[in-house]
Image (spheres, rainbow, N blue to C red):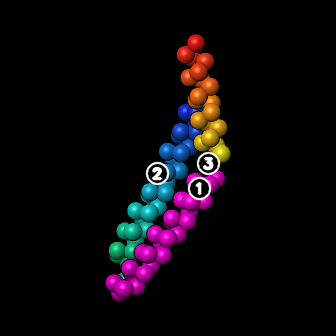
């Protein structure tokens, strides 16, 4: 059950990130500014999202490692 809960959390957070990126992209496309300004803003947003993903990955790495260890133990016990 714990692994399923972690999976649900990862799915939700991944979906939220993707939704945020799509929403930001749509907002930029309809913004009343020049193409150059829009491209610069879009580039900045992409860089920000990249940084957010790196932070998220770093934060989740220990939790993912624990899930992996628990899964390995479960598979090992189930193989007996």
Say few, some or many: other residues with alpha carbon within 10 Å of mark 1 (under 14 / 14 to 19 / 20 or more): few
Q: Which mark is residue 15?
A: 2
* Dot 1 or dot 2, earlier in sequence: 2
The region drawn magenta spans 34-61
Q: Which residue is drawn at 62% across and 33% down?
A: 69
Viewer-proximal residue among 29 and 77: 77
Residue 67 position in % (x across, y down): 61, 36
In space, the residues marked 1 and 2 are separated at their CA atoms by 13 Å
Identify the secondary structure beneath mark 1. Answer: helix
In space, the residues marked 3 and 2 are separated at their CA atoms by 18 Å
Residue 52 position in % (x across, y down): 56, 62
Q: Is residue 52 magenta?
A: yes
Determine whether label 3 and label 2 are within 8 Å by CB.
no
Say few, some or many: other residues with alpha carbon within 10 Å of mark 2 (under 14 / 14 to 19 / 20 or more): few
Q: Residue at x 56, y 60 (%)?
A: 54
The residue wearing badge 3 is 61
Viewer-proximal residue among 80 and 28: 80
Left or right, residue 58 beside residue 27: right
Identify the secondary structure beneath mark 2. Answer: helix
């Amino acid at each position: 059950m714990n692994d399923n809960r972690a999976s649900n959390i990862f799915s939700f957070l991944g979906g939220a990130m993707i939704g945020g990126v799509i929403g930001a992209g749509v907002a930029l496309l309809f913004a009343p500014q020049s193409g150059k300004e829009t491209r610069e803003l879009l580039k900045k947003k992409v860089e920000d999202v990249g940084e957010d993903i790196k932070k998220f990955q770093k934060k989740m790495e220990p939790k993912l490692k624990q899930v992996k260890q628990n899964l390995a133990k479960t598979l090992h016990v189930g193989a007996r």
